[in-house]
Image: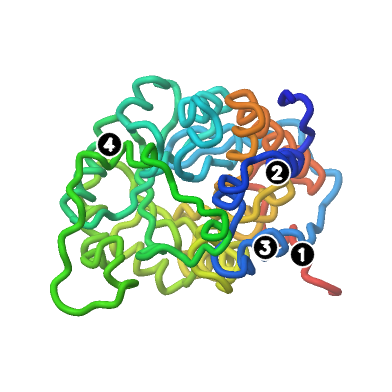
Amino acid sequence: MTAADFLSLADYGRHFAATAPAGVRAWVDGGAGDGITAAENLAAFAALRLWPRVLGDLRAGSAATELFGRPLAAPVLIAPTACHALLDPEGELATATAAALTGTPMIVSTQASVRIEDLTAAVPGADLWFQIYPQPVFADTLDLCRRAVAAGCRALVLTVDAPVSGVRNAEQRAGFVLPEAAQANLRDYAPPPAVEGPRSPVFRGLVDPALRWAEAGRICAESPVPVLFKGILHPDDALKARAAGAAGIVVSNHGGRVLDTVPPAIAALPAIRRALGPGVPVLVDGGVRRGTDVVKALALGADAVLLGRPVLHALFAAGMSGVAHALTLLQTETEAAMALVGAARPGDIDATLIWSGPQ
């Protein structure tokens, strides 16, 4: 099949579900526990109703926007996801090329299958950000940040919601384990030090026992590029993140892959936006599949959305051209939805475009 055979992101998802190897399918589409939150991420968007306005002036309409002074073709970024080489032989090189072609920033995962230095050199036209998983040794976390900045990444995204791995039964049943390729950015670092004294197997597996608010603040203080905290669901944590120096927030439940039965990210978004007020970049991920979802997210307070699983579905189906096509589909759908609700620009979208029931 070619990219032209797919008419929506859901088409890519169905093709992936029907044809991907069982282990890869469990890793990409599976959620933590019983998958309740992973499913509710989608259902929460579907439950929202748009409330359009008519006869506005749309002649200068465009989904184009900017974040941190950088242009975006639409309020969409590629979310950080691990080891793209599992989906296509070109891996992140294919994804980054598609991102550059479509004017979409890409957040590269710590667990990418290519070193960040090699990726930025290979695709110099891409707007690449870098996601940071805290390492067992805090000095290695700082080094990872410095390497990403030196390589040319324009922002850092610190994942704060996964101090340990979630219970992923789908992956366990399929016997899936991330391959060695996912260590491309981490091979220079020492294994975690031995833990002294008694500690449960779960807490021995902490990503970094030392990473707390003070250490997260140090990452912000030492970074010459914006640092966003990803994995915030509570408004109090959003305020603490800002106090620690975060330049922005990603409202996220990790795609429902870490802790099951937490709220859908889109449901947590409005309270976080109210707490932070205007002017602080707030992004959201989890459940975006249509341009209408992008408009709903912006209406509830997001500046942009992150797209994760659909990018992997498209990469599996048709490589670089599949990802470029999927991103173009979403950009086109977003502009169509904007026009149909009466919004010429992303800045015209607000909460009045969400139906709140009988008035």
Which residue in the protein does label 4 denote? Answer: 149
* Residue 255 location (% of width, % of height): 55, 57
Q: Nearer the viewer, residue 189 or 277?
A: 189
Left or right of residue 16: residue 24: left
Q: Residues within 10 Å of mark 2 (few under 14, many from 20)?
A: many
Q: How crowded is mark 4: few (under 14 residues within 10 Å), some or many (20 or more)?
A: many
At a point 69% along the width and 59% down the height, the residue shown is 42
Q: Nearer the viewer, residue 34 or 102?
A: 34
Mark pair 4, 3: CA separation: 35 Å
At a point 85% along the width and 48% down the height, the residue shown is 54
Which residue in the protein does label 1 denote? Answer: 47
Q: Which of marks 1 and 4 is nearer the N terminus?
A: 1
Q: What residue type is labelled 4?
A: Val
Left or right of residue 134: residue 334: right
Mark pair 1, 4: CA separation: 40 Å
Which residue in the protein does label 3 denote? Answer: 39
Mark pair 1, 3: CA separation: 12 Å
Q: Which amino acid does label 1 sit on?
A: Ala
Secondary structure category for the residue under label 1: helix
Do the residues under discs 4 and 2 have CB atoms within 8 angstroms?
no
In the picture, the quarter occupied by the N terminus is top right
